[in-house]
Image: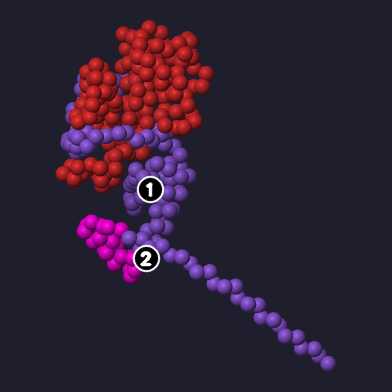
Chain colours: A red, B purple
Amino acid sequence: MAVAIRHLEEFDDVESFDCGDEPLNNYLQRYAWTNQQKVSIGVTYVAIDEAASHTVLGYFTLATSSIPRDKLPKKYVRGLPPYDLPLILLARLAVDKRFSGRGLGHALISEAFKTILRVADDVGCRCVITDAYRDKAGWYARYGFIPVEGAERDGPQKMFLDIRTIRAALQQGKK
Amino acid sequence: MARITKNKTKEAPPRKQIRKSKFQADLAPSEDSMVRALKTELQLTSNTDFLSDALALFHWAVSERKRGHRIVSESATGERKILVFPHLERVAPELALPRIDIHWTRAELENLAELASKRPAEPTDALIRAMRH
């Protein structure tokens, strides 16, 4: 199966997508297109089988965000640039359960990292944040995401990855 | 007999009073010294002139970035540097990713700031493989 990853398109078949998690299915089926095209709060990339080019096998969504410098504790801002802290949010990533175990998650996160680096090179960005389900935090940790401690309640685990670590990986990958 | 007509002098329209806004800023000592040094270098005597020039420059930068133009400085030897300023990038049309706000607790912000100000971690094997993919 030849897989391609591209922007979500209006007539992609998202209704049959089932990753086994209702909120992630629901996001793709109900909100991803609207959020991308109409209200512009997230761009969704989909993995598709080139032989059935509108069937979505997996997806991820990216958005940008930032943290105002004055919200950050003073003892740390000296080590940071004198601006708001710009970041990219890896908002969602899911694979249809019929296609799990075939390396699609790895392909999706690879594409996400490459897109993130391109955006970071164009607009400047310090880190990537993802809100991971706690039982999936280990999967993100394999790629170097570090848990951000201090959430108020149980729920998704915010995880951090420095853009410079991704750049270093790109360099090391070329060797 | 010549008629002498008096030209009626048109009454000047009442002068519109230009309302001026006051602008006040709390500057850190280092920023205050920067303003003073810049005023001296640029031979500006008043804060109003300083702010007016700074505003004109910022307005120009925003309008250039809105048109998709990049702001570049070039040295005499041709070495180029591109200005990347996060607030300006928000108006850039080629910015493909939209912007959203995330809720952070104080403790999360503290931990995030600590992580972001540290030296970056070494990439993991999986990350290196992902970048080769």
Residue at the image position 31 percent from the left and 38 percent from the top: A66
**Image: B39 above or below A164:** below
Predominant secondary structure, magenta span:
helix
Q: Amino acid at mark 2?
A: Thr
Indicate whether residue B48 is drawn in magenta.
no
> Which numbered disc flags the more N-terminal residue, 1 or 2?
2
**Image: B79 above or below A140:** below
Q: Please state the extent of the stretch shown in magenta in the rendering.
A: B25-47
Q: Amino acid at mark 1?
A: Val
Q: Which residue is mark 2?
A: B48
- Going by the picture, which residue comes out furthest to the front? A153
**Foreground: A73 or B98?**
A73
- One can see residue B128 in this view: no
What kind of element bears circle 1?
strand
Residue at the image position 36 percent from the left and 61 percent from the top: B23
Please identify the quarter of the rendering in which residue B32 is found: bottom left
**Other-residue count near label 2 (Cα within 10 Å), few / some / many at <14 / 14–19 / ≥20:** few
Dot 2: chain letter = B
For residue B72, which numbered disc appears in the image?
A: 1
Dot 1: chain letter = B
